[in-house]
Amino acid sequence: MYFVTTELKSGFIVSILKKNSAWEAGPFQARSIAGTYFVFRAGNHILRLFIFLFTLLSICFFTSSLLAAESVAEPLPLNSGLHPIDWVIIAFYAVMTIFLGWYFSRGQEDTSEYFVGSGQMNPFLIGVSLFATLLSTITYLSTPGEILGKGPVYLVKDLAMPFIFILVGFFMLPVYMKSRVTSAYELLEEKLGLGIRILGAVMFLGLRLIWMSLLVYLTAKAITTMLNVGDEWIPYIVMGTGLVAIIYTSLGGLRAVVITDLIQTILLFGGALLVIATITYHLGGFSWFPTQWNSNWDTQPFFSTDPATRVTYVGTFLSILIWYVATLCGDQVSVQRFMSTRDAVAARKSLAIQLTVSVVVSLTLAMVGFALLGYFTAFPNEIPAGMELKKDADNFFPHYIANHLPVGVSGCVISAMFAAAMSSIDSGVNSITAVVMTDFFDRFGIKPKTERGHIFSARLLALGIGVIVVLSSSLMGSIPGNITAVTNKTANLLTTPIFCLFFFALFVPYARPAGVLVGAVLGTTTAVLIAFSGPIFVENYTSDMTDPISFQWIAPAAVTVNIASGCLISYLIASSQKIRTGT
């Protein structure tokens, strides 16, 4: 087989046709060799492009910092909203992503190519894509808001990344990568039977549909803040965001998703840097960086025996550690990306890239929160009427983007927000489509006779799933709490129960389907009781009241109850079976 690669010669990137007999080219590769393989076999050059853009943005940031040393602190001029140039930038980004979806749709011949890129994806691209998928607009908005309104303890989560890499990279991935599957839930049937496989698939569908609905709603709500329009515009913004993501995802499959995720990562990181740069310039330096605990922040102890304490260092570390491990090992969105790499080593590289980029962007978004707090503290008259730093912390980032950034820069940053939303929608839709096609249609023999018909069905299904997400997003506005709390109370309820299914299947030799089912029910019930402990256990509860149990204990408590009860019931069943059979 011949493929196009790239090399750097005399300062120029050139294309070279090379032969590789170790891997036979399929129809898709043969048809799009000059395009797709130029991109996907040039991983090193894509990495160089990423580094170049990162360096360029950093230069702009530090240039503004140097200029700030010669300037006097003054408030930024207030804009009346988005300029037509900003709208042109946003429209260009939307058209570009749709074009990429069409481009990668050409010549697709089988669902393996559509769902997992034929298992030959570049580890760097997969790592960045996994980061972009798990980031989403939720994190992009919630991190600055959490830092601004609650305090910096949220950053403790980054200390968990090395432990996550060891647990997932060296203990989990080698086991997973032994089986090359399209749907992660195929692994469950081998050990625990068809019923548990269907249970896992159904739980995943519920998890991702709720998650995508939430992030689409939050994106639309943030955009209404930027446009200074009422909530009645939310449905229209939801439809616009969802439509673009659905079109390019249903057309291009995983390859389109991965490439757009790379672009979206650059956009959202650059957008955060631009916000920091403008504030640094107008404040005359880094005076926005806190040197003491702000009076606006909550008390955030290292540990507390009071479960109602909203955030602690220990709680943050444990909840993030468990959430990441559960998501990376039990969520089709993650497993599908690992399966698209060559082997366990390549998957581990993707994981390392994902966690590294996550830490860098997390720290950058935290700096955005610090910068916003410093800016509005220095210029309290710039705080809009009816908004408070603590109560409305989630709204200051979108307000600043729309009303204080220079023309053109606002368009870039808003495109980054759309990018964060679409990177999660595209991954969710693609993964849900893979699960429905593999675990339901294909498993029960409901599939077209040809591969082209199979791909057409997958695209049609992806379109339908996107429509469901857009419609269900209207239900998300009734859940109380800031973005961080709402996310944990909805989208993350099923994360640990799904992971526990894999834990039983792969690491508990005496696991029995009945025990696993009991564990899943009790674990999910525990998560729901903690997430909604306020409305359930507090009489006359209102949204501004403190929950009796913090959202940080949802994951630790749910996984503990799930595994303990599942292991106990499975052990009792296995023991009784041995007694009856006399073995």
Image: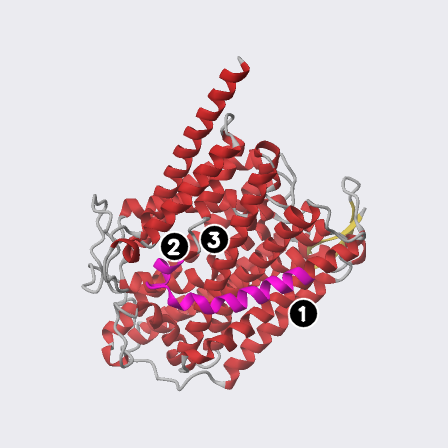
Q: Position of residue 567 (x, y in %)?
A: 43, 30
Identify the residue shown where x is 47% and y is 69%: 474
**Dot 1 alpha-carbon crowd within 10 angstroms: few under 14, some 14 to 19, many 20 or more:** some
**Is disc 3 placed on a helix, strand or loop?**
helix
Q: Nearer the viewer, mark 2 or mark 1?
A: 2
Marks 2 and 1, the one that precedes in the sequence: 1
Asked whether disc 2 touches disc 1, contact meaning CB atoms under 8 Å apart, the reply is no
Q: What residue would you read off at disc 3? A: 357
Disc 1/disc 3 C-alpha distance (Å):
26 Å
As rendered, which of 18 and 313 lies closer to the eye? 313
Q: Is residue 479 left or right of residue 212?
A: left
Q: What residue would you read off at disc 1? A: 99
Amino acid tagged 3: Val
Q: Position of residue 59 (x, y in %)?
A: 45, 66
Tell me if residue 492 can be seen. Answer: yes
Q: Main secondary structure of the magenta part?
A: helix
Disc 3/disc 2 C-alpha distance (Å):
22 Å
Q: Position of residue 37 (x, y in %)?
A: 72, 54
Q: What residue would you read off at disc 2? A: 488
Q: Is residue 475 magenta?
A: yes
Marks 1 and 3, the one that precedes in the sequence: 1
Amino acid tagged 2: Asn
Marks 3 and 2, the one that precedes in the sequence: 3
Q: Point out the stretch of residues depicted in magenta.
A: 460-489
